[in-house]
Each structure stands twice: as C-alpha cells, then as structure tokens.
Image (cartoon, coloured by chain):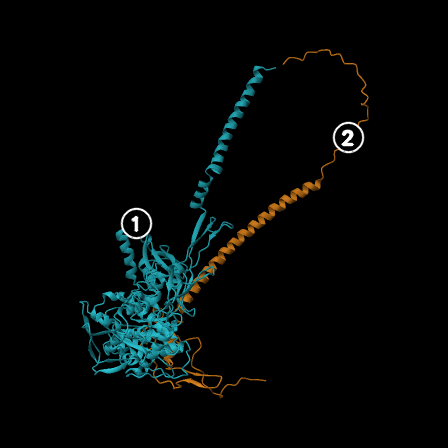
Amino acid sequence: MSALPQAAVVAPTPVDSPNRRLRVVEEPSRRRRPKLIYGIVALVGALSIGTAQMALSILTTQSSYELSTLAQESRELTWHKQILFDDVAGLSSPQYLAANASALGMVINESPSYLRLSDGALLGAGQVSLGASSVDAIGRAAVPNALITDTPLVTAPGATIEGAPVEPEVVVTDGGVSNTPPPLTDGLPTPSTH
Amino acid sequence: MTTRSTRSPRRRTVIALAVVLAVLSGFIIRLVDIQVVNADTHIADSMKVALGASRTLYGTRGEIVDETGQTLAGSILLYDGVLDPKNVGPLTRTDDDGERVQVPWSQIAGEIAAITGQTAQDVQKIVADARAEDPDSQFAYLQRGLTTEQYRALVDIGAPFLTFDSHPARTYPDGAVGGNLVGFMGIDAEPLAGIEKSQNDCLLATNGALSFQKGKDGVVIPGTELEQPAINGGTLQLTINRDLSWYLQQLIAEQVQDMVAQSGSIMVVEAETGKIRAVAEYPTVDPNNVDASADADRGSRLFRNFFEPGSTFKALTAATVLDAGGQTPTSTVVASSRETFANGARVSDAFNHEAYTYTLAGVLIDSSNAGISKFSERVDSATRFDYLKRFGIGAGSAVGFEGEQSGWLRPAAEWDNQTTYNTAFGQGLTTTVPELVGAYDAIANDGLRMPLSLVESCLRPDGTVVEPTLPEPTRVISEQAAAQTREILENVAIQANYAKQIEVPGYRLAVKTGTGEKSDGNGGYKAGAYFTTMIGFAPADDPKYIVVVTLDEPTKVTSSAANAPAFQKAMTQVLKTYRVMPATTAATLLPKFG
C-alpha cells in the first residue's frame, strides 16, 4: 500500500446555518459499577439448582433401590399367597363339604317341608328324616377331585373324600400344646369376677 | 507491504486452519452420522446389548363360575423346571462349619427328586439322555407343571443349571363337578374341550409387556419403564348350579353302579327360561386329572349321544292330537295288545291285554303302543311331522355344545307304513336328551318352547356384560293343549305302575318313561339292552323344573323302571334347592278307560 496522496482541499467557506447552535457537551454519566448481588444470586441459583438436581437424583436412585426391594418382597408374598392358595384349593368343593358332613353322621333329608309364617301351616309331607341318606357321600363317593384326593377330612381326620383311610401323620408330642385337658384337682376352674 | 517473510507464516496459518477445519468437519460429520442419521440403530443396539430388558405380563384367563358365582375354573401359576444338561455338575456349598464343600451331582439329583416326586435315578436319566442325544444340550425339562411350593423349594437348592419358566395354568376347585361341561386345557394352555374351548373368546387373556432399562447392577433406571398392560379374560357365568350338580352326579353314579349300566345322566332345566341347571353324568372327567378318565368319558355324552327315544314321544303325539286333532284327554280308542293296521303295519304292546277302550290319558298311563298308534291316526302324518319339527326334534339345541349331535327325523313323505305308526311312540327316529327336554319344555311352559342355554353371560374386564344371543321361543302347541298334556302326564305319575317309586310327598309331579331300543349295528335291535329314560316336571300345575334321567343299558332292571329311584331323588333335590313350595291343590284324576 502506498501512502495516501496528500491533496490540499480548500475548505469551503463556513456558512452559518441558522439551526446550528453550539451547546455545552453534557458530562458523560459515570459508568456504574456492576452490582455484586446479581452475580451472587446467579451463582447461588446455579449452585442450588445443581445441588437440588443432585439431591433429587440421589433420592430417585435411592427409591429405585427401595422399589426393587419392595418388588422382590411383593414377589415373595405372591409366591406365599400362591402356596397358600394351592394348599386350600378344593376345600370349598361340595364333595369335601358333603364328605365332612357325612362323616359327622349327617344325612341328606328327603322331601322338604316348609312352615308358613302367616298362619303357621306346615306345607309338605312333614316326615322325619330317615336314618339313611339319599346319597352316600363318603362310602360311595363318586365325584372325584384330584386336588383333595389325599386331604384328610376335617371331621374325620382318618379318612379322605373317597372314604379311603389316610396314613396317620406322626404327631410330634414334645413341646406345643397338648389336646388332652389337664386333670382337674380343685374342681372346675371358675373365672374370677367382680 | 507484503513481503516474503510476512507471506509465509500467513500461509502456514491458513493451512493449519484448513487442516483443523477439515478434521473438525470430519468429526462433525461423524457426530451427525452417529447422533442423527444412525441414531435409532445405535439406540436399538444399546437397548439390545446392554440396557434394555422386558418382561411378559401374563393376563389371567377368565374364571368360569356357576349360577351363584362359585368358581368352577380358575387360574393359577405353574412352573416348568428346565435343566441345562451341559452344565450339570457338582455344587460348592458352605457347610455348617463355614467350610466350602463339593456336593456331588448324584446327591443334588436326590434333593431335586425328593421335591418333584421323582427318583434320583429319574433325574439323572433325564440329564444322561439329553447328553447322549447332544453333548452340548442346554435344555431338558426336569418336570412341567410344578407348583409354587415345589418351585421355591427347588430354587433353594441353589443349582445354577436349574431354571424355571412360569406360565398360567388352570385349576378346577370342584374337581369333576361340572367337569363334563367345563372341559379342560392342555399343558400349553390350549383349551381342549368343553366350555373352555367353545367360549375361549370370552375367557382368553391378552398378554402385555413391561419394557425398561436397567443399570449395571440390574436395577431398573427410573423413568424408563414402559408398560403395555395385560388384559385379563372375561368371567364366564354358566347357568348350572354346582351344589345341585354335585348331588346329581353322586346320585347318577350310584344309580349306574346299582343298575350295572354303562353310563347315565341327569339333566335339569328351568321350564320358564330354558336355562340348564345341571348336566350330571357318570362316568365323567375330573379336569384336574384328565388322564384318569377314559377318552370316551372326557366330554359330555349327553350332548354327543343320540338315541331312539321310545315311549317318551307318546306325550308329543298326545300333545299333537290334542292341539290339531280335536281330541281331549278323555277321548277314546279301542286297542288290544296286538294291532294290525289298514296299511299292514303291526304294533304290539309290552304286555298282553284284550281290547280295551282306552282314553288318551289311559294310553299314556299304560304306555300302550297300539293305543297311541290309533290316536295318531286322528291327524295326518304330515301334521305329526310338522309338530315334531316344532318340538325341535332333529334340530339340536340352542346350546351348540362342542360336538353336540342332533336327532334324525325323516320327512313324513318318506315314512313307510310301519314308520308312520312307529314314530307315534318314538321309534324309527332318533333324538338327543337336550332335544327331548326342549320338547317337554313346550308342554311345561304353556306351549312355548324356550331355547336351552348353558351360558348366562360373559363379564368382560372393562365391565361390559355380553349375553349370548338365543333364538326366539317357538310356539308349538296352544296353552290349552299344553295344559291338557300336563294333566295327562300328571295322571301318569299318579296311576302308572311305578307311581309309588317316584312319589315326592307334598308335590304334584308329571312324568313319562321311555325304553328305547338300541341298534346292534347291523340294522337290527340289540336284544334285552335298552336306553332308558324318565322325564318329568314339577309342580305339574305350574311347572318350574324339568328333570330327565337316562341310563344306558341297565342290566339289573332293564326297563325304564331302573330310572325311577334316581328320578325321585333328583326331583326332590331340585325342588329343595330352588325352594319350590309344596302343592296346595289336588290333582284331577282322569279315567284310564272310557
């Protein structure tokens, strides 16, 4: 680059414009120092956001472990529930009820009789139940249920719904509460009342 | 002022910048390629290899419940134990003293066998067989269908080569009660028979899935679970009553054994609605243990069998001539025990008698073939055929049970001289028990035959109740003809020779027996072997329930009298179960002879 050519320019004769007036330049306003407080707020804000995020993250992680533990617990309880459900399956069946009732000596009565409340009239034959049941629910049980084939009856622990004898379980006698009542020495025990 | 010295570093800067830019743009392109262009593939890979996991959420197959809501079929979970034969071997355990000891495979096999009910040899054989077939085999079923208790006990052994798959399975709390109807499922949760199969649409569950991402230690990363819930199957309610079904099953079993019959069945239908309240059969199937039953016993004979009905059809002929032939219960014919008709057909009765002047009621009381044949002449064959059709004979039932048969009835034009009369007393045609009950329902229900039904409703998981669509009831005979037929059938129950056997004290019954001949398979009849039926309803003046008892080839008593004790007990139990009040009015006695 070469130096700029020096040219003499003749300044035009200044013409006073009627609108132009000279005025005093105002003193430039002094630049204010930035306030420290904003910086602090921003920094604290950023930090607290960071901390909160971290805290939340820790909490979420924590609870996800907790969830995992609870899920495991819930699984175990479900298994437990299933085992218990399997244990009682079939006990609600009519075969089981009828066999239990039969073992107690209950019979299925023949024709029903009804007592009319309005006038006390007896409707039906009004016969007593005969000794024999109309079906033999335990001696000739013919409605099988594989779920309870080996389940002892409640009322006759020595038999099953099919009337077959069950192997008696070995009763553990040491410890536990005995079924045999203690011998009475001082007469019948009486509750003390006030 | 460009000089050589200033030009050179500038160029170098430019070149360096260009190189940096080129490398940078290379990175940018790669970054865009990874993050944008192929992002999905990479995410998918990461899910597949490391993070992603998913689990099947099994929906529960719907329950089958009875009329009162008692469960007939429910769902449980069972487990399949799977061995990894390649890796089967001794286990290292810590004993009581805290020392690590090796437990040999034979002992582990013994522990496993004690839980599954096999022998140690069985378990070892499974592994040995699998290895013999393929030395690298990693899959052999130890046992399928393990219970939860067995499964947990096996897990406690701590064998890494033993894994488990859980799958939903069925349980039938009441065993064989209703087993013939409910049906059963295969081990792979395929419905194989009965309602389980035919109503699978209602019961079927839709499996869902739970997908999630997991961290290094297997813990689910929060917020990544995406659940597509499983949809449970609907609850199917049947019209049958399980307590009544149990009683009737026990009853028919005893009766079949007492009479040394091949099989037997009892069916109970509510007269006003056509709802089936019980289908008891013997022999039958316990869906919990299907293998214990013979193939032929695994379904419902009652729906699958058709038979020649015999005298139970006399009631249908009587209803026809009352409705269309201008007859009354006291109209008469003269019939002896052997009659030869104008067209050459010969009809004889089961007992010898001279020419009696029978009333229509008397013909049914004595179950005279000759008598009902003479009455059948009061209407033409085409009319009788038409009435049989309207009674539903040959059309099956509205139940549409799996494998259900229908009777066989030729058009009147094809009836030969003998068949024309034989059809009046239930020969020369076949029917099924549901058809027969449907026909009697028309008599019991004021001439209106209700379609039989077995399914009450399907309750879907979203709460909607779907009821099966049934055909419209059929008007078969007039109310008056129905009432007259009921009166005749009530007189049968009072005056027939088995009246004492079927009496239910306090109640008015209507009844008719049938002793159907059985085909010997060569176009003739089996000698001395019958399919016996006893069908009736109570109370006779306002029928609530229709009960039918059948026995196939009873041998102690070969006639339909074999059914009487079971019919009496069945009817008594039905009346008790549904609290039907005893009669307060007396029956009108009709004369047997005119």
Side of B471 relative to A194 (left or right): left
Chain of the residue displaying label 2: A
Q: Alpha carbon of mark 1 to alpha carbon of mark 2: how far?
A: 92 Å
Say which amino acid is labelled 2: Pro
The percent position of residue B154, horizontal first and vertical second, equals: 37, 60
Q: Which residue is mark 1?
A: B136
The answer, for residue B150, to whether it is visible in the render is no
Q: Nearer the viewer, residue B219 or B34?
A: B34
Front position in the image: B540 or A120: B540
Across and down, in percent, residue B119 comes to 29, 63
Establish whether labels 1 and 2 are both on one chain. no
Please rate how many residues cluster around mark 1, counting C-alpha atoms within 10 Å: few if below 14, some from 14 to 19, many from 20.
Answer: few
User: Which chain did the image draw in orange?
Assistant: A
The numbered dot on residue B548 is none
Residue of label 2: A28
Q: Nearer the viewer, mark 1 or mark 2?
A: 2
Q: Is residue B517 visible?
A: yes
In this view, B55 is above or below B333: above
Which image quadrant is residue B99 in? bottom left
Identify the element where label 2 is drawn: loop
- Residue lying at the far bottom of the rendered structure: A187
Q: Is residue B94 above or below residue A107?
A: above
Q: Position of residue B510 (x, y in %)?
A: 34, 78
Marks 1/2 in contact by CB < 8 Å: the verdict is: no
- Quadrant of the image for the N terminus of chain A? top right
* Front in this rendered view, residue B41 or B384: B384
Q: Nearer the viewer, residue A75 or B196?
A: B196
The residue depicted at 73 percent of the width and 36 percent of the height is: A33
Vertical order, B225 against B148 (above or below): above
Query: Looking at the rendering, which quadrant does residue A180 occupy?
Result: bottom left
**Shade representing chain B:** cyan
Could you tell me which chain the residue with mark 1 belongs to? B
